[in-house]
Image (spheres, grey):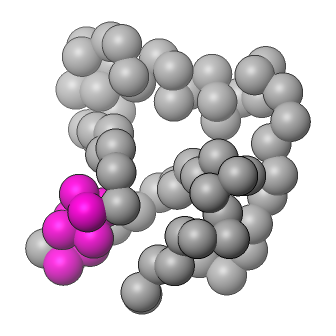
């Protein structure tokens, strides 16, 4: 994950997909994926070897977000 894409619209397809995954367990099962919330849980998943598809960070927290990959 060497790049950052700024998303400015809630109509962005990635945001729409994220919202769908957050509220629909059927969609999570269908796509064989899940949503992790919080830096601690993200780091735990990485330590266990889960493959990350996307990471979303609010812009106001981005400067404090330091992911150790």
- At 34% from the left and 33% from the top, the residue drawn is 31
Residue at the far bottom: name it: 69
Q: Main secondary structure of the magenta part?
A: helix
Look at the picture and state if 27 lies above or below 40. above
Q: Is residue 50 visible?
A: no
Q: Position of residue 22 (x, y in %)?
A: 38, 22
Residue 25 versus residue 67: which sits nearer the camera? Answer: 67
Q: Position of residue 17 (x, y in %)?
A: 55, 26
- At 51% from the left and 79% from the top, the residue drawn is 66
Q: In what quadrant of the picture does the C terminus appear? A: bottom left
Look at the picture and state if 22 lies above or below 53. above
Look at the picture and state if 69 lies above or below 67. below
Q: Position of residue 55 (x, y in %)?
A: 52, 56
In the image, 34: left or right of 64?
left
Residue 51 versus residue 5: which sits nearer the camera? Answer: 5
Q: Is residue 63 visible?
A: yes
Q: In what quadrant of the picture does the N terminus appear? A: bottom right
The stretch of residues the image draws in magenta is 40-47
In the image, 31: left or right of 14?
left
Look at the picture and state if 56 lies above or below 17. below
Q: How many marks?
A: 0
- At 33% from the left and 12% from the top, the residue drawn is 24
28 in magenta: no
Residue at the far left: name it: 48
Residue 20 versus residue 31: which sits nearer the camera? Answer: 20
- At 35% from the left and 61% from the top, the residue drawn is 39
């Amino acid at each position: 994950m060497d790049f950052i894409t700024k998303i400015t619209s809630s109509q962005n397809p990635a945001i729409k997909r994220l919202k769908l995954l957050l509220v629909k367990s059927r969609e999570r099962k269908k796509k064989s994926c899940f949503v992790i919330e919080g830096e601690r849980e993200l780091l735990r998943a990485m330590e266990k070897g889960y493959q990350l598809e996307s990471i979303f960070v609010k812009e106001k927290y981005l400067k404090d977000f330091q992911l150790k990959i």
